[in-house]
Image (cartoon, helix red, strand yellow):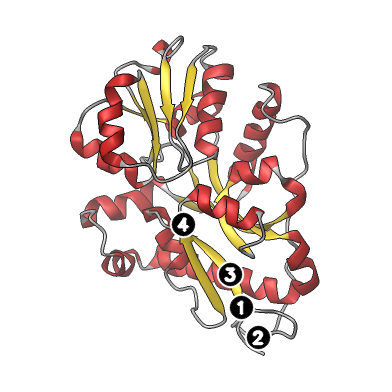
Amino acid sequence: MLRGMSLIRVGMINFTNGLIPDFDFPEKGFKKIYGIPYQLNELLRTGNLDLSPVSSMEYLLNPKLYKILPGICIASRSYAHTVGVFSDFAPEEWGGKRFLLTGSSLTSVYLFQVLCKKYLRCSIECVFQAPGEGDMEELFRSAGQYDGLLLIGDQVREFNRKNLLPYHDLCSLWHRFTGKSFVFALWLARADRCLSHLDFYSKIHSELVHSIESGLENLDAVFEKSQTSWDREEFLSYFQESMLYKLEKEELEGLKQFSLDLLECEFLKSSLEFDFLQPVAVEGNSPTGS
């Protein structure tokens, strides 16, 4: 460890899409803390994590707290499979309807409201589930009380198994209107911590990039390690066709478009600049060296 640094607390998303960054990330020198997006958002915001993948909306709401780790994210180009609304009504019929919105997420809740307000030009009634994973049996029972349910992550697959309602993918809807990718999560570091240990955080960034590349190159091994309930073909297709882990020009354009839409819809009070960590060249391959 570097002098003055305690064990680095790294968040990992406890959903299937979190398997890739975690695949080849080292154990030594780190304390991995697993959680769903809303939990990681809160832990990083309150200083109980040092860096983590968190809802992109967390950064947009609190940009001064964080530095964005460049080049990595969790995004989708046109169909996410695990972020959407279950409803008998098509998106063009959502006006005046009542929706229950998951408490597991932050970004998807704002994405849904932006899509309705700006692009579908409709007014909806939103009921916000208390923060948490949500009890699936309760969600099944609640389905009949609302015109639609917004769910994310593995909740979507569980609900799909019941085949109760048609699924409308929010990323697909976003891409239909904007033609852009959508960034669901950014890797953020606490600005008050990383700036005084830039060389160390640069090594962590390097480890994350390596782990993501390794996971994507070894999807069969990720599948075997995951102990998932997905079948192999479904699992491989999800990562090969739906998920993006590189924060490149197209993803940044989608993120900037989302921030402008939030401002237009008055979910943000002012425009912002994206503040990236600037990694420095460091010697060695492991951030756990002394």
- Disc 2 from disc 1: Cα separation: 8 Å
Q: Quarter holding the C terminus?
A: bottom right
Residue type of the residue flagged with mark 2 = Met
- Disc 3 from disc 2: Cα separation: 13 Å
Residue at image mark 2: 1
Left or right side of 54 for 142: left
Residue sitting at 62 percent across and 80 percent down?
287
- Disc 4 from disc 3: Cα separation: 13 Å
Query: Taking 201 as reference, is 174 above or below it?
Result: above
Residue at image mark 4: 35
Name the front one of labels 2 and 1.
1
- Disc 3 from disc 1: Cα separation: 6 Å
Instruction: Answer yes or no: is residue 101 visible.
Output: yes
Residue at image mark 1: 7
Q: Are marks 3 and 1 in contact (CB under 8 Å)?
A: yes
In the rendering, which numbered label is found on residue 9? Answer: 3
Q: Earlier in the sequence, mark 4 or mark 3?
A: 3
Left or right side of 121 for 221: left
